[in-house]
Image (cartoon, coloured by chain):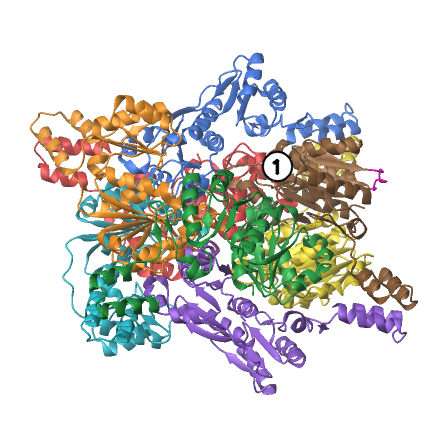
Chain colours: A green, B yellow, C brown, D red, E blue, F orange, G cyan, H purple
Amino acid sequence: MSERTANILRSVRSGRVPVRAALERLKDLPYKDIGFAKIDNHRALRRGFPEVVFGAGKTVDQIVKISQRIITNDGILLITRAPRAAYLRLRRRYPGMKYDAKAMAISYRARLAAPKEGTVLIITAGTADLPVAEEARLTLELMGNRTEILCDVGVAGIHRIFDKRRALERAGVIIVVAGMEGALASVVSGLVSKPVIAVPTSVGYGASFRGIAPLLTMLNSCSPGVAVVNIDNGFGAGYFASLINR
Amino acid sequence: MSERTANILRSVRSGRVPVRAALERLKDLPYKDIGFAKIDNHRALRRGFPEVVFGAGKTVDQIVKISQRIITNDGILLITRAPRAAYLRLRRRYPGMKYDAKAMAISYRARLAAPKEGTVLIITAGTADLPVAEEARLTLELMGNRTEILCDVGVAGIHRIFDKRRALERAGVIIVVAGMEGALASVVSGLVSKPVIAVPTSVGYGASFRGIAPLLTMLNSCSPGVAVVNIDNGFGAGYFASLINR
Amino acid sequence: MSERTANILRSVRSGRVPVRAALERLKDLPYKDIGFAKIDNHRALRRGFPEVVFGAGKTVDQIVKISQRIITNDGILLITRAPRAAYLRLRRRYPGMKYDAKAMAISYRARLAAPKEGTVLIITAGTADLPVAEEARLTLELMGNRTEILCDVGVAGIHRIFDKRRALERAGVIIVVAGMEGALASVVSGLVSKPVIAVPTSVGYGASFRGIAPLLTMLNSCSPGVAVVNIDNGFGAGYFASLINR
Amino acid sequence: MSERTANILRSVRSGRVPVRAALERLKDLPYKDIGFAKIDNHRALRRGFPEVVFGAGKTVDQIVKISQRIITNDGILLITRAPRAAYLRLRRRYPGMKYDAKAMAISYRARLAAPKEGTVLIITAGTADLPVAEEARLTLELMGNRTEILCDVGVAGIHRIFDKRRALERAGVIIVVAGMEGALASVVSGLVSKPVIAVPTSVGYGASFRGIAPLLTMLNSCSPGVAVVNIDNGFGAGYFASLINR
Amino acid sequence: MSERTANILRSVRSGRVPVRAALERLKDLPYKDIGFAKIDNHRALRRGFPEVVFGAGKTVDQIVKISQRIITNDGILLITRAPRAAYLRLRRRYPGMKYDAKAMAISYRARLAAPKEGTVLIITAGTADLPVAEEARLTLELMGNRTEILCDVGVAGIHRIFDKRRALERAGVIIVVAGMEGALASVVSGLVSKPVIAVPTSVGYGASFRGIAPLLTMLNSCSPGVAVVNIDNGFGAGYFASLINR
Amino acid sequence: MSERTANILRSVRSGRVPVRAALERLKDLPYKDIGFAKIDNHRALRRGFPEVVFGAGKTVDQIVKISQRIITNDGILLITRAPRAAYLRLRRRYPGMKYDAKAMAISYRARLAAPKEGTVLIITAGTADLPVAEEARLTLELMGNRTEILCDVGVAGIHRIFDKRRALERAGVIIVVAGMEGALASVVSGLVSKPVIAVPTSVGYGASFRGIAPLLTMLNSCSPGVAVVNIDNGFGAGYFASLINR
Amino acid sequence: MSERTANILRSVRSGRVPVRAALERLKDLPYKDIGFAKIDNHRALRRGFPEVVFGAGKTVDQIVKISQRIITNDGILLITRAPRAAYLRLRRRYPGMKYDAKAMAISYRARLAAPKEGTVLIITAGTADLPVAEEARLTLELMGNRTEILCDVGVAGIHRIFDKRRALERAGVIIVVAGMEGALASVVSGLVSKPVIAVPTSVGYGASFRGIAPLLTMLNSCSPGVAVVNIDNGFGAGYFASLINR
Amino acid sequence: MSERTANILRSVRSGRVPVRAALERLKDLPYKDIGFAKIDNHRALRRGFPEVVFGAGKTVDQIVKISQRIITNDGILLITRAPRAAYLRLRRRYPGMKYDAKAMAISYRARLAAPKEGTVLIITAGTADLPVAEEARLTLELMGNRTEILCDVGVAGIHRIFDKRRALERAGVIIVVAGMEGALASVVSGLVSKPVIAVPTSVGYGASFRGIAPLLTMLNSCSPGVAVVNIDNGFGAGYFASLINR
């Protein structure tokens, strides 16, 4: 931030800007206050991607207003856990708006980013883990990553993952999405020299306790090279993967 | 029990046994009350193996008295979580008494049983899981089973287990002993058509929560054919395996 | 797998198969990739029973496609947590398809297997545990086992189980299904010399915490010879019992 | 309390006691403030037994001072979790002082109470549960109850409890002390028409979680007529049993 | 049971009953097997009250059949968590049938029992705890106890309970029903010399965790004389109170 | 209470009041018993604010009756978790009755209180935490406090809170309402010399476990000066803040 | 911070300070980096009290170095969980250094602060809760508050607290320290119109789970006006109380 | 693996290698079986770093034997949770062996790796988190990474982290090590566009539950870009960071 501050100081020295105004500018932090929300306009600069909207618990009106502000600012929009109604409203104004029903996410990108070279491979243990995987894939693609999905290769038939050795080799980063006992993350990590981001899902029953079982499995992986995000948090896994994909 | 009861009834009918005495006999259940313990003499008949002594929290005197009673009755003795001092006392009287330091178990068998045909394979994920595996092995051998141990084949280097395919094929029953995330049970079960008895261990740290993580992993195994015993319960796994080994 | 590999190697030596093709074959692992699922065709060979479909969270279309593939391959089908709609669609094509409403399971068997000799006895503590017991029974029968069910013999009136001594004696394997405090598994195990597979159920209220109370009870059974499967997992208990039934 | 208050009021009316003094007396609640402790002298009157001292975390000096005060007041003393050193100091002054090493409790009774008619039966599942049972027995006897102990009759050999039917019939109240899975409370309760007070103990290992498993078992007992006290709380069980013993 | 057995033995001796028939009788335990349920006819004799039906998870048909059997046998019926529909069906046949909507319980008593002398006082912390209190009251009255209810006297305004001193004094047994933090049980117990049965309820929010907070509070009561039943288990508290009410 | 008691005593001495009547008055504690509830009329005197009604689980009739009694007594009413129907009924009689839909609370104040000087600042981490914040604000205003709300300033864009330094400085007390990981309370507390009351909310998913994650975060704040109330308990936070606001 | 910033800006305008130096000053945040620790010199200004040192896990050398720096800066020092050895070292240099053995805390105050007018009352349920209460008292006194301690007034003999009404009335703020079931906080809060800060302690056994039971009790207090700090956190309670004491 | 397999196949075709020998080679998986351990020689090739030895629970002899094997194979060694005795033995043979007392780790590197360009910044919230940070640093340096450590910048004095903006900017990857409430990870992540690996530590007391509190905080971070490893798992964080550092 020192460049901007130095400019303000120079303006003060030259007398172009009075002390009071400079004080205000130094305080003027870059976000937009629209009452029920403070949109962090600065985030795309600071973090490389604008604020992502968590749709659950917001009204359609709130979502639309926040979305317009973000698109104006950054040209990219991602809303997770989004109601379809918000999509329908937004599409009227932004025809390029997309809705991914599996991931329950709204997305928009004004200009296509030049994709990164590396590929992120998303692996699911079962078919029921797909919605979480889709949320990860969507996040990754919006952030300019190539992705590949390998579905239903859980450890009950572990030869299925060995057969996909080539996909494992192609990837620069791997996301493993698994519920039930979540053993797949350890197994995959043991086969590769790449970072594995593990996403426990709430798929399972009884003593899986809505995702606690795979969460603990993944945190305790006997194979190093695994880091974990929250239960069902496909967006978080995708975001993290994008940060480390080259 | 009807045979014994029928005999008592016949004795009553024939007048050989008066009603009062028959009443006593019908009530006379087969155990030995030695005050601080009631030794279940009947158990070897009813369950195929005498009462196993849980050594922790008993004095050496108590252990010795209980042990003498069981040996007299059944000729076989197993004490888990046993203090070495009890072993030293017992060995004076029973030279064939054995102490397994790794498993912390005292054992004795007057006559060698004709071993069963089937083999029980015990697999551990890591070296630290060995004491639990030893407890299982000892229990199995005392109950007349052949055993084989495969040590340190955790999923971090999963090719180690694939290399041991033949051992997997030889076994009639498999015990998997694993701490940390406990994924090995699911992987092994997915490779074979044999029952897998999973023993979670308290090996691990942080979020393994002294065995809760592998316990949940094993209960939620996505591969059917796995049943679970208590954390660190090598004895329980061995006992169960012996019941199903042919 | 060495037989198949040896054949491939012999074909290479004889020149019948070029190196590149042999490489492919060695990699060609036996499953069918139908996009959203990878059906493990090899499982019936490897594990003695084809892949079992977990119906929850799958569309009817997905279930139907997966089912056709499995029936073609193996002639046996089991779908747990199955929607009735999937059954109705499947029945049109396979008139022998069955739906068990209590267990919420679809099943199909092209040819009747010669039943095994041993009987598996399923015992429930209460009437409310019946759906889980039914899931176990169905799984067992599909896998060629004789079964017997003893219902509502919980420990509140423990003489009911003593009266069924003969059924306990007849059985080769026993499954105990119990919610609330789950004490029945320990009691039954203490009476017999047979393996007891314990299934905790989510039946109960308050501090049963949807099955945690009986799960802990069963894991801590003071009577050896008990192994445990996941809460409400009748299928898992049946599958495991079939593996150990003679 | 109205009798005492009426007397004070009458004294005021008659002029024998001025208003200010009466005010003080009405406020004068019956306990003794000795700085680090407020001894509830009134408790023996209000609750039928004086305050019981929890010895853990108190210095010997504190224990001795509190004890003298209670003995002076009520002639009965019970200290649970008591250090032996406190006993040695107290015995010098009160030769009748007793120390129960198993229960780790100090007790004293100036005059023997006429014992109640009813008997409280204390049953333990295993030998390791004895210290908790002893704490209950000691409390009961100090409060003037007859007791009987049945030790080591856990459900692994359930015929041992059936053989003790007569002891069950003799008792007016039953205390069941059990660790591991704690199933004994349900079984005993199912056999009798008497109240069963269940004490879970921290005896066990792995998933008994230091008493949580038997605590949940006992709270969820499928057999009505069971109430539960804290883990290892033999004193609490004895105290409650004394309140209901006739 | 020895009286009945002695008679059988005498019949055998006298030749009136052949051995085989005697064997059958000795085995003939007193319950009625109606397929989906085994009704414990013997329970009223053994335990002083017939089997209580847990209505949840049973069909109306099942409830009706079980109810008829119990009424025929014992003339008393209690069904907890009962669907209103079952009541309507039963009332057609038994006009004296009653339904308590607050407690969601069906009850019936052919002949009024001579009430016991003692009174059981039921205290609730808040208005929302009433349904659980009602279940306790109904159980108690059916078992021939006099009851009194004190409602909404939680510790936030503790003078309300002090004002009810007389009710506390009248009672022989006290049941405290409380959710949220459940402190009322300790406070009441500290005031009286009577047994307090504490029932935690799932009333509360956030960190009350559906009854865990008051359950722990009650188990840890610093005031002895408190025993605890399961969360929301008004029936269990009433049943236990009846066993100890004189 | 001594003033009132002294007066009664003086009346007794002077003979104006007989002993029996004085006894009654001394016992006459100030609440109104309306059967299903005991309204604590004394609370406004004793605690500075009348009893607050927890609307959940009460019928509209019960709420209306309790409300009338409180308004008559104190002229102020607050009902949390209130059904709209109760509001509609109450408004007919009390036109000044208000309903805050976001907070789901009914409130009424006959006379406006002179507001306190200090301001309570309520800060939320996200938009979804607003209903809890509203409940706090409403409680505060009814109790005569000035409030200010800062919304959506979570630590993901921490400059938003730094920009609001002036609001932080203005406030005498700060309430922080946050779900997910709840880190905002620690951060805010580290910036100010004022008490921070932290309210964890159940906003979040997966491993936030309906508010447990922010609850633990707030209890473990590395910055002193934070105290915590129950999950989602905006009312409790507002009430506590009012007690400490000057 | 705007005053300091304005001064810097004025210096720049007047040419007294060059832009580069001003930049440094604007960045120069007020803490001292001594390698293994960054001492927050600014804290006494920002928060009204210097950084408090958590002694556990620091070497004596580290503690001494940090302490010297804080005393030089602020003249006040508080070290919680402090080893006696650190005290002995510090006393050599600062004769006024104090060690409170019960609270295990080192404290120092160069100049006595003019005490605040209000009194903070600290109440403990039992004698074993005293060390936590002492930590609170020490913190309060160092921060210039008058304190009073009421010890051993738990709810088992609730009249002891009623007798102390005057102390309750004198206090401006109340801290309640309680283990076991922690009911005292709710009871005290129900009697007063003052803020109650509740400190759960790890005193208790069995199902108190090292403080979880009283923590939940206090969070769920049915009496508003209670806020909670971490288990055994006497310092945190004292610090918070000082912030709100007038 | 296809290159090695192709070579074997080519040897078979050319007749140089008979089928049986080829079969063996194809099976010959690259690890060394030394009885109590199976050393995964292949891991350095497959995963870029040799097997890391978990020292806890292994004898010095076992550690020494495993270490020799790994050094011979790969020239790099890392042993975490290592006993000093093992270091002393190993140093005799390998003078370059190092022991890091803070991290309790033994390390050895035959040849210095050319360091990677990127820097990994390790930040700790407090001084007590240092041992975990050291374990991470050591792992990183052994794997050829540049590291930087920022110590004691917890959110209680958040300006300390803002002052270190430049270090944040220099880093390619950031590891945040924090106990207590663990809020630092969210705050740091909100300031940067780099991946943040969060390590919860067991530092804290009371309701931090040995690391559960910061673990949940980090999993629920409201700021995306955070992934989590096990409690106290500095090694895991360092290993993962090395995989993503460029």
**Along the viewing direction, whichever of G195 and G83 lies nearer the viewer:** G195
Q: Residue at x 31, y 24 (%)?
A: F64
Percent x, y of residue H202: 45, 62
Amino acid type at image mark 1:
Val
- Quadrant the N terminus of chain G occupies: bottom left
The mark tally for this picture is: 1
**Along the viewing direction, whichever of F120 and H51 lies nearer the viewer:** F120
Q: Secondary structure at mark 1?
A: helix
Quarter of the image for residue E193 reads top left
Would you say residue H132 sits in the magenta stretch? no
Percent x, y of residue C25: 82, 60
Q: Chain of mark 1?
A: C
**Main secondary structure found in the magenta portion:** loop
Percent x, y of residue G196: 27, 47
Label 1: how many Cα within 10 Å (few below 14, some 14–19, many 20+): many
**Along the viewing direction, whichever of E85 and C86 lies nearer the viewer:** C86
Q: Which residue position is annotated with label 1? A: C155
Q: Residue at x 81, y 51 (%)?
A: C45
For the question of whether residue G145 can be seen, the reply is yes
What is the magenta range?
C110-119
Would you say residue C114 sits in the magenta stretch? yes
Vertically, is A73 above or below D188?
A: below
**Along the viewing direction, whichever of E205 and G209 lies nearer the viewer:** E205
Position of D240 with respect to C41 (left or right) is left
For the question of whether residue G1 can be seen, the reply is no
Percent x, y of residue G50: 26, 66
Vertically, is H37 above or below F171?
A: below
